[in-house]
Amino acid sequence: MVLKCLPRPDTAEEAEHFQRARARLEEEVRLAAYLQHPRIARVHGLVELTHGLCVVMEHLEGLTLDTLLSVAQARGL
């Protein structure tokens, strides 16, 4: 399992950002439930923890996006 977390806000300004980010994260989880492909991590749900809001998803073996982008850049793609 992998957790993608949105930390709880410390200030009023961060609280406003947190609410917008929370809405986007909830929509992401809702839409991800419809996706099923061997190369797309399955999303199991959204959990609220004391330190923030976390998306629980499947861990897939393979290269990271960062590595793939570095390889593509090295090849001039």
Image (spheres, rainbow, N blue to C red):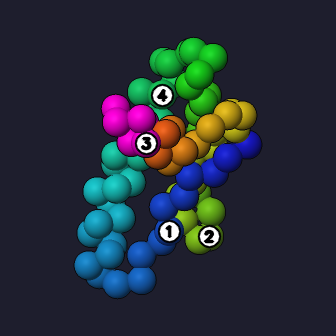
The residue that appears at 48% across and 28% down in the rendered structure is 32
Numbered disc in front, either 2 or 4 = 4
The foreground one among 40 and 73 is 73
Q: Residues within 10 Å of mark 1 (few under 14, many from 20)?
A: some
Determine which residue is flagged by label 1: 7
Name the residue at the front extreme.
75
Cα distance, mark 1 to mark 4? 21 Å
> Disc 2 versus disc 4: distance between alpha carbons?
24 Å
Task: Name the residue carrying label 4.
Answer: 32
Nearer the camera: disc 1 or disc 3: 3
Amino acid type assigned to the residue bearing label 4 in the image = Ala
Residue under pointer 3: 74
Q: Nearer the viewer, mark 3 or mark 2?
A: 3
Q: Earlier in the sequence, mark 2 or mark 4?
A: 4
Q: Is label 1 in a helix, a strand or a loop?
A: strand
Q: Is residue 19 above or below residue 36?
A: below
Q: Read off the magenta span.
A: 72-77
Give the labeled residue for mark 2.
Answer: 50
Q: CA distance from mark 4 to mark 3?
A: 31 Å
Residues packed near mark 4 inside 10 Å, few (<14), some (14 to 19) or many (20 plus): some
Q: Is residue 61 above or below residue 33?
A: below
Amino acid bearing label 2? Thr
Residue 51: x %, y % from top left? 59, 71
The answer to whether the residues at label 2 and label 4 have Cβ atoms under 8 Å apart is: no
Toward which corner of the image does residue 64 lie, by quadrant?
A: top right
The quarter holding residue 14 reads bottom left
User: In the depicted view, which residue is nearer to us: 55 or 76?
Assistant: 76
48 falls in the magenta region: no
Q: CA distance from mark 2 to mark 1?
A: 9 Å
Relative image position of residue 35 (x, y in whole percent): 50, 18
